Amino acid sequence: MINRIGSWISWLNVALVLLICIDVILRYLLNVTEKWVIELEWHIFAAVFLIGASYTFKHDKHVRVDVFYQNYSEQQKALVNLLGNILFLIPWCLVVIYASIKYANVSFSYLEGSPDPNGLPGRYIIKYVIAIGFLLLIIQAVLDSIEKIKTLKWS
């Protein structure tokens, strides 16, 4: 599931590059800038970042400080990752999911849009993407924790 979502969301990068190119061309050749285009750029970037985090985590491509970790055995790495998931990642994801759903629900309750003239309507949509991104991340963290437990159990 995470692989399919990650592959799908990666195509938003292509859309983002095209949108930015069009925006730059219009801005510098025709001196035309639309607020909704700029807002759409950061909405797409936020969606790629938030939803792509679980894919990045699944493939172990996230940022890691490898001062000691790189020299650990597979069992030690599994233990460090398991403890990190249980003590830090999963609780933090729960906090962010809880807070972001409340945040998005308030935004949805009054159909919040951009405060800027000609901005995007439906700002609550990107706020729900925060919760979706962290929900996917917690799912991957649980799956990763199960894998680490298996590594520790069978090694």
Image (cartoon, rainbow, N blue to C red):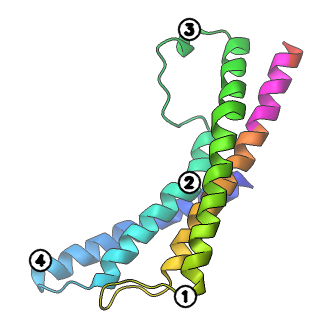
Choose the circle earlier in sequence order: 1 or 3. Answer: 3
Q: Which residue is mark 2?
A: 52
Choose the circle earlier in sequence order: 1 or 4. Answer: 4
Label 2: how many Cα within 10 Å (few below 14, some 14–19, many 20+): many
**Residue 94 % position (x, y):** 68, 50
Indicate the quadrant containing the C terminus: top left, top right, bottom left or bottom right.
top right
Q: Which mark is residue 28?
A: 4
In the orientation shown, which residue stands out farthest toward the bottom? 118
Q: For residue 105, what is the image quadrant?
A: bottom right
- Report the residue at 45% width, 88% height from top: 121
Question: Which stretch is magenta?
Answer: 144-152
Amino acid type at mark 4:
Tyr
Q: Which residue is mark 3?
A: 71
Q: Tell us which disc is closer to us: 2 or 4.
A: 2
Is residue 9 depicted above or below 126 in this figure? Answer: above
For the residue labelled by badge 1, is the local secondary structure a helix, a strand or a loop? loop
For the residues labelled 1 and 4, the Cα–Cα distance comes to: 36 Å
Amino acid type at mark 3:
Asn
Q: Tell us which disc is closer to us: 1 or 4.
A: 1
Q: Which residue is mark 1?
A: 110
In-front residue for pair 23/40: 40
Q: Tell us which disc is closer to us: 4 or 3.
A: 3
Q: Is residue 124 magenta?
A: no
Amino acid type at mark 2:
Gly
Label 3: how many Cα within 10 Å (few below 14, some 14–19, many 20+): few
**Residue 135 % position (x, y):** 69, 56
In-front residue for pair 133/18: 133
Q: Tell us which disc is closer to us: 1 or 3.
A: 1
- Report the residue at 27% width, 77% height from top: 22
**Residue 13 at least partly seen:** no
Q: Are marks 3 and 2 in contact (CB under 8 Å)?
A: no
